[in-house]
Amino acid sequence: MAARKTSARKPAKAKAADSATPDRPRVRPLRWLLKWLMRLGGIVVAVMLMLVLLFSAVNPPTTHTIWSEQKRLGSVERSWVDVDAIAPVMLRAAVAAEDANFCEHWGFDMAAIRAAIASGAARGGSTISQQVVKNVYLWQGRSYVRKALEAVMTPMVEALWSKRRILEVYLNVAEMGEGVFGVEAAARQYFGVGPGQLTARQAALIAAALPNPKQRNPARPTASMTRRAKAIESGAATIAADGRAECFE
């Protein structure tokens, strides 16, 4: 009987799973971008916090505005003075002129902001705390980037600084005339006295110049500036009487 032929079976092909190249992880550009943006944001916030903590105790050596004006004019008048050496009427006048609810808000005066928007005012609603953040850490001018940074840093300053410290820094870095920065320089430039000897009227005149210091001279006030100073002097007396000055006195 003839032997049954058996045909050799061909070797089976390797399984696809064994021969396939391992899958590479899929790159998700949006997820990668969001991850790095979050990391960058965390770094930015950490740097902000460190700067806010630093200047809660250390006096800012300069600001962008002071630096730019010094570069433009060649020199500026400025000398730091501790808040204890500033006449209390000057502190009250600055608050009455720029931020009457200074003791009552956490950095943003929402009522003042809504009023400014409703009236269409080009300037208004900005608290002293916001102005300190803008002057010390940021720059002048209008931009969404600056506004966003200001919105983040203002609550930090409110949380980590006392109200008295905020007002001290403000009165030392605010522009109070052409090349004149801070209340020490302003008091001597316009009235020939130290900041501790300012009268209520002199303090009110300096405060009246704050919105437009390059165009207003406290030593030679216009009629409208004189009226404004009288209103500020009255407002300073009012906030002293009704308790709105307690947080910084």
Image (cartoon, grey):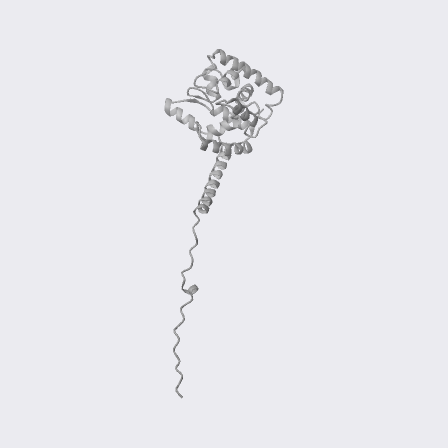
Q: Quadrant of residue 138?
A: top left
Residues 202 and 193: in front is: 202
Q: Above or below — where is 49 with respect to 244?
A: below
Q: Residue furthest top?
A: 223
Q: Residue furthest bottom?
A: 1
Residues 189 and 9: in front is: 9
x then y, percent, for residue 77? 42, 21
Q: Above or below — where is 14 with respect to 220?
A: below
x then y, percent, for residue 187? 48, 18
Q: Residue furthest right?
A: 242
Taking the spot 52% from the left edge, 13% from the top edge, the residue there is 227
Residues 194 and 187: in front is: 187
x then y, percent, for residue 152? 50, 34
Taking the spot 59% from the left edge, 17% from the top edge, the residue there is 237
Say if residue 235 shows up in the picture: yes
x then y, percent, for residue 242? 62, 21
Taking the spot 50% from the left edge, 25% from the top edge, the residue there is 170
Q: Above or below — where is 138 with respect to 227?
A: below
Say if residue 81 shows up in the picture: no
